[in-house]
Structures are given as structure tokens and as C-alpha cells.
Amino acid sequence: MAGRFLSLFKPIARVLPEIKVPERKVGFNEKLFWTAIVLIIYLVMTEVPLYGIAQEAGDQFGALRVIFASNRGTLMELGIGPIVTAGLILQLLVGSAIIQANMSDPQDRGLFTVASKFFSILLTGIQAAAYIISGMYGALPTTTTIIIFIQLLGSGLIVMLMDELVQKGWGLGSGISLFIMAGVAQNILWQTFNPGTGLFVGSLSLFFSGQQTLTNWILGAGVYPSLIGFIATIGAFIVIIYLEGVRVELPMTYAGYKGFRSRYPIKLLYVSNLPVIFASALFANVYFFTQLLWSTQGQPPPGTNILFQIVGDYNATETGIQAVGGLAYFVTPPNTIQGVAAEPLRAVVYLAILVAFCAVFSLIWLEVGGLGPSKVARQLMDSGMQIPGYRRSGRPIEAILKRYIPVVTVLGGVIVGLVAGLSDFLGVFGSGTGILLSVGIIYQYYELLMRERAAEMFPAFRRILGE
């Protein structure tokens, strides 16, 4: 039965926009078609500017936009931020039992989805209003303010429905993953080949014309990316691909067939890239809301207000607004080697906070995501699997899983935190978090495409895959 909190959303379910689950089997080619349509719409929205605002060169949220798949001054200004934030909050509330919900119950699961959509829309409105109130678009007349708010709210609804369209079986994977991957790819290509500031076009032409030194081209200068960052990007891809394949394999047998042996893999990145998504989303919201508070309180100069010295002190310059102290300062990394050398304390504290939060979120997700030893042991028992040399019971399986899963989970969380943080310090294209997310998403899409293709070519596989 649905908990009291989720029951509040029953009336709302009737009025919220919804994509219906397909009543027929959607073919592989049709799924590819709808996935491509959604991706094209997203890419178009990242290039369509918001009506009524003046484009500015500076972007104080530039380093934080990767996980939100957003683009400054366009219809994708908010990106997937409200959806990710709403989902994160609700998942943590359910996981901590503050909200009672049985995710194996279709009714509770449906109401949870409705609650997620409601809070996504609510947060879209709150963030849109916050952007306008904070003065991000400058002083605006009332009519223009309303138009911008409607554009941001409408774009948020479209993004939410596109994600739902893909997730409900019309497409492949999830819209959120698709948008993140596309955003990171855009970022990498732009930093590499942009005619104005790209490493191998704009920046290199400045070097050959004598306007930039070889040292600046290698280490980066101003808005120009660095050769070290490009090399680090390739290295990060290779390291993360390798980590995706590291696993511990437990020998298993199938009770129904004597002599049948298999292995249950426990990946090093057991909870995938979710910990770094949660940590980065938390950091991004800390940065955003502390800057909003600072803007609405008259933008006091750095070091003059004790509250902002704790939560986030900012300084307004010609190039934009920058965090110079407080919590917001320590949850944003220096994105170049020169930055790390100039601010070593900031780099060390940022890396420590990121790694700690990734480890904590990894453990939290074990229970929230149903990946804990007890639930996995129950699933293996229900499927008829057992560990050789032990009687067929859930207790020995659970005991053995407890030796591995918690340790691997924490270790995986620490490693993804280190990879994301150190990649940022080297100035990788698309940010360390973006590279980590994109590799994980590409890997998931590869597995999904192979499964879909096999099921399409050999219909009997559907029964094996549980479809």
C-alpha cells in the first residue's frame, strides 16, 4: 500500500502530462528512430537562444553544466538539473525511510514516478525564477521576465517528457543519459576544433602567428584549452574503460542442472557512476544557491560578511562571478595545472570532499537501488543459483556477498571520486565528471544495443532476458 506522503499525489497524477507505455512491442529500428529524434530535439534546444536576453561571454556555472547537460542562454539553460535534483532528493528520502514506499509494489512505484515529475516541474519553476531574480540576465522589464520564465518552464517540461518517452520503451536507455553523453561530446569537440578557441584550430593558429607561446599552448591560457588537457582526456577515457572491466567473479551453479556452472560478476564500479552524479549535483546546487543568496543580499565584497565567508564568498569581476571563499569555493575545482599550483589547499580540500561524498553515496545507493547483499542473495536464490560447496540457502550466499559488495562499493566510490577530481586538475575536455559519466553511459548503451539486437534477431532470447 502507498505511504501517506505518496498518496497525496494520486489526484495530481490525472493532470500531469504523461507519455503512455507502448501497448505493442516496439522494434529495434523504431527505438533507434525515436532515440535519434529526441537527441536531435535536445541538440536544437541547446542552440536556440532564449528570447529577450542579451548574450554574455561569461558563464559562472560553466564548469558545473556538464552533469546538467545545459547550455548558457539557450532553451537548455536549466538542462536536466531539476529532474536530477528531484530524483536525488526523493531517492534519498525513500532510502532513509523518511518516506515510506515499497518500490516492488506497482502502485507505490507509479506514485513515486508522479511525485518525481511533480517535483521536477516545481524545481524547474523555482530555478527559473531564481535565475531571473539573481540578475543573471540583467535588469528586465516585467513582460520580458514573464516570457523568459515561460520559456524556461516550457523547456523543462519538454525535457522531462523526452526523458519519459525514451525510458518508457519508445527509445533506448534514458533521456538523461543521452543528454549527458551528447553534452560531453559537444564540449570535447568544441574545445578541440572550435575555430576561435579550439586547441587544434584557434589556439594553434595563434601559436603559429606568434600571438601565443608554446608553453601557453601546452599548458593552456585564458579561454584556450591545453595540450595537456587533450592528452589527459584520452588518458581518462582509457583508464575509465579499463576500470569498467575490473570485477570479482564468484563461482555459481544452477540447482536445476547438475554440472552447469556460471559466475556472478561484482564490478569494481559496482554502483556505476551514480556516486559522482550525486556528489556533483550536490556541489552544483550548493554553488548555485549560495551565489543566488549572495546576489539577493546586495553582493557584499569578499571578507565583509561572516555568513558568506562560511557558505560561499563571491567576487564580481569583468570575466564573471567567481567563488573566492567558503564552502562554494571548496566544492569547485581548479581546472588547470596552474590553478592547482596556485591554490593547492583548494585542490586538496575539493578532492577530499569529492572522494568522501562519493564513498558515502555509494553505500547509500546499495540500499536505495536494491543492490545490497541481502537483496542480491534473494535474487540469486529465486533464479535457482547457488554457490558450489554450500547448501542451497540464502544465508551462505548473503554471507559471501557481504565480504565483497560493501568493500567493492566503497572502493569503487573512492576511485571514481579520485578519477573525476584528478581529471579536472589536468584540465580534461568536458570535465572529469563528464568523461566518467560519458564512458559509463557509452558502455551501458553498448550492452543495451547488443541485447536489443540479439533479441531482435533471435526472438527466443527474449525469454532468457526476461522480456
Image: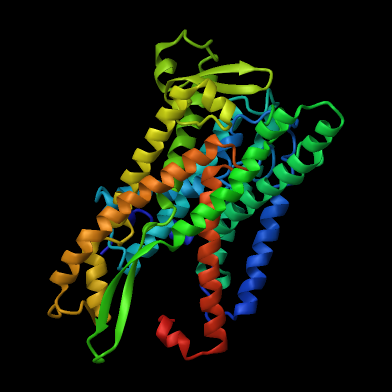
Q: Is residue 396 left or right of residue 136?
A: left
Residue at the outermost front position: 214
Vertical relation: 122 (above or below) 388: above
The front one of 351 and 162 is: 351
Residue at the image position 42 percent from the left and 34 percent from the top: 351
Residue 10 visible in the displayed image? no
Residue at the image position 56 percent from the left and 26 percent from the top: 339
Residue 41 visible in the displayed image? yes
Q: Tell me which corner region of the image, top left, top right, bottom left or bottom right, holds residue 146.
A: top right
Residue at the image position 62 percent from the left and 49 percent from the top: 184
The front one of 447 and 304 is: 447
Vertical relation: 417 (above or below) 105: above
Image coords of residue 40 (percent x, y): 70, 59
The front one of 22 and 262 is: 262
Vertical relation: 256 (above or below) 306: below
Residue at the image position 69 percent from the left and 26 percent from the top: 140
Image coords of residue 185 (percent x, y): 65, 52
Image coords of residue 25 (percent x, y): 54, 82
Residue at the outermost right position: 209
In this picture the colour scheme is: rainbow
In the picture, the quarter occupied by the N terminus is: bottom left
Q: Is residue 449 left or right of residue 254?
A: right
In the picture, the quarter occupied by the C terminus is: bottom left
Q: Is residue 305 left or right of residue 377?
A: right
